[in-house]
Amino acid sequence: MSSHRLPLALIITVLLLGGSPCAVAQQPQGANKTPAKATPAAKLKLVDINSASRAELKTLPGIGDAEAERIIAARPYPSKAKLAADKVLSLEAYAALKGRIVAVQKAQPKTKAKPRPETPPAGKS
């Protein structure tokens, strides 16, 4: 008898939760597709803290003239986390904007090594 109680309990639980064992089959086609419009977060342009102007930095939440100047003065940043680690911004200010900033590293131009002057081997002149 106990083997009949488990399936019955499962069916009752599903029905109480507002579902139906056939709910997946009853959904219209395309019901699970994401909407065509992009979310507002996808439209945000990331600001590069290593190259942004003062005006661009001031578009970030909580960044005014003083904060923008501190960010510019402490460049370059190897990572965006250095803003908080080096106390350029408070942890709270960094947390508010970390999803909107990046720290892009400029590619260093490769310089050719200067040729070493040839020196005679030791003991031979």
Image: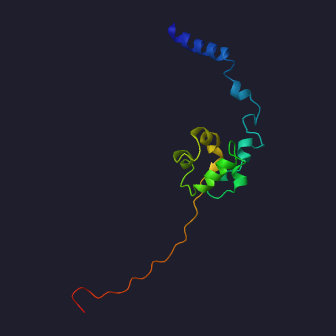
In the visual, does 31 lie left or right of 109? right
- Count of numbered circles on the image: 0
Residue placed furthest toward the front: 66
- Residue 106 in the image: state x and y as whole percent: 58, 63
Residue 40 vs residue 115, the one in the foreground: 115
Q: Residue at x 23, y 90 (%)?
A: 124
* Residue 100 coordinates in the image, percent (x, y): 66, 46
Work out whether 75 lies above or below 107.
Answer: above
As displayed, is residue 92 above or below residue 59?
above
Looking at the rendering, in which quadrant would you find the C terminus?
A: bottom left
Q: Give residue 30's quadrant in the image.
A: top right
| Res. 46 visible in picture | yes
Q: How is the image coloured?
A: rainbow
Q: Please state which of residues 26 and 81 is positioned toward the viewer in this rendering.
A: 81
Q: Residue 120 sits in which quadrant?
A: bottom left
Report the front residue among 88 and 48.
88
Is 19 drawn above or below residue 70 in the view shown? above
Residue that appears at 54% across and 49% down? 82
Residue found farthest to the left = 123
| In the depicted structure, whether residue 74 falls above or below residue 121 | above
Report x, y in % for residue 98. 61, 44
The spot of residue 116 in percent (x, y) is: 39, 82
Q: Is residue 69 left or right of residue 5?
A: right
At 67% from the left edge and 52% from the top edge, which residue is drawn? 47
